[in-house]
Amino acid sequence: MIIHFPCPLSSSSSLHSLKFLNRVRSHSSLMTTSEARGFHVTTTRKEIVAPASSPLLPLPENMIISVSNLDLLLPPVDINVCFFYKKPLYNTTNDVLKTSLAEALVSYYVLAGEVVANPITGESEILCNNGGVEVVEAAADVELRELNLHDPYQSIAKFVPMKVHGVFAIQITELKCGSLVVGCTFDHRIADAYSMNMFLHSWAQISRSDVPTSYMPSFNRSLLNPRRPLVIDSSVDQMYMPVTSLPLPQETTNPDNILTSRIYYIKADVVRELQTLAGNGKRTKLESFSAFLWKLVAKHAATTTDSKLLNSKLGIVVDGRKKLTEQETNTYFGNVLSVPFDSPSGPGSIKDLRYRIRGGTRFRGLLREEFSGDPD
């Protein structure tokens, strides 16, 4: 998966912003040096950065923030975000980044906490204890132009930190050419991409100047209280299954069962061509490309007898804040997302599929019920 986040250092920097799901990785111990396809990343320093103390804005001490139903839908998975910059024209020191991080954590104190279990219900909740964020400083004996960004697990994975404790971790790596890589790892149970986007904007503003941040987060979980009386549409049964019914994950060496991640750069003129193929009227880039991708999946599914491939589904992550009425949701920090999906019924054409991608009855119906509770 690819997502574009704002530049947390300089708007003039060359940015490759990449997001990919962090697979389960087992490590017997933390190594100070790692190797991947001919280059080394060496850890030079580790430090815990806590929120900056201020008499004007006292920090909460051991405050508990409950999680919403949308938070509870997510498993304990870590998400990685990585930023690559050419050698900056000005001197950006790690100390500047760490100082501004401490100031940003004053408003985003949740990121300096940890997820704990409620002693009564056993459900996850956020303990805001100002424990801080681990910042790893590192150096790599490779230049930016030499990195193979097409294969993230052979390159990008070395620039994102393993989260040892808490809900957030950062790694700052200087390359041999003077370029800088900032990698972040966060617990998806406490934030979605929109939320981390707000934080990164705030961190960027503080890093570049001393002006107050324009993004003040809201942790008001009452905005997502369940409906009373409870109303659940039948479509929910098609989207989710009990966790207890899922098989336990197993290690495998079968190449057919190993997840493969690739990153592709698609030029603007190619996307415009896909928009034209989608038919008359303006179609968004996401709609057009998703229809094209779905067509490839459907075309392949039509030539196989593998039941797993025949049941392939396409899901698109959608931010639900605009579907809620409260103005405060624009700054809500947490998970407000859904993944409406549908299945390809055959090879079809881009023009046919884009109607379904557009939302039509299936996507729009699922999204409306997911966020507003109106199945009609």
Image (cartoon, rainbow, N blue to C red):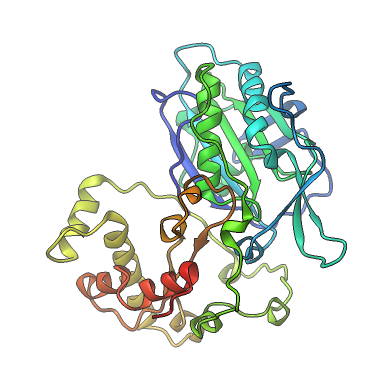
2, 229: nearer the viewer: 229
Residue at (59% x, 67% y) in the render:
255
322, 310: nearer the viewer: 322
Whether residue 234 is visible, yes or no, is: yes
Q: How many numbered markers are drawn? A: 0
Residue at (47% x, 17% y) in the render:
88
Whether residue 151 is visible, yes or no, is: no
Give residue 368's position: percent from left, percent from top.
42, 71
Question: Quick check: 368 above or below 275?
Answer: below
Give residue 27's position: percent from left, percent from top.
79, 49
Using residue 168 as the reference point, say whether residue 323 is left or right of it. left
Give residue 94's position: percent from left, percent from top.
63, 19
Instruction: Give the quadrant of residue 44.
Output: top right
Extreme left residue here? 280
157, 332: nearer the viewer: 332
Using residue 10 as the reference point, say whether residue 292 is left or right of it. left
Residue at (45% x, 77% y) in the render:
312
Question: Quick check: 137 above or below 148?
Answer: above
Instruction: Give the quadrant of residue 89.
Output: top left
Using residue 54 as the reference point, say whether residue 202 is left or right of it. left
Extreme front residue here? 228
Position of the C terminus, as image quadrant, is: bottom left
Question: Quick check: 315 above or below 208?
Answer: below
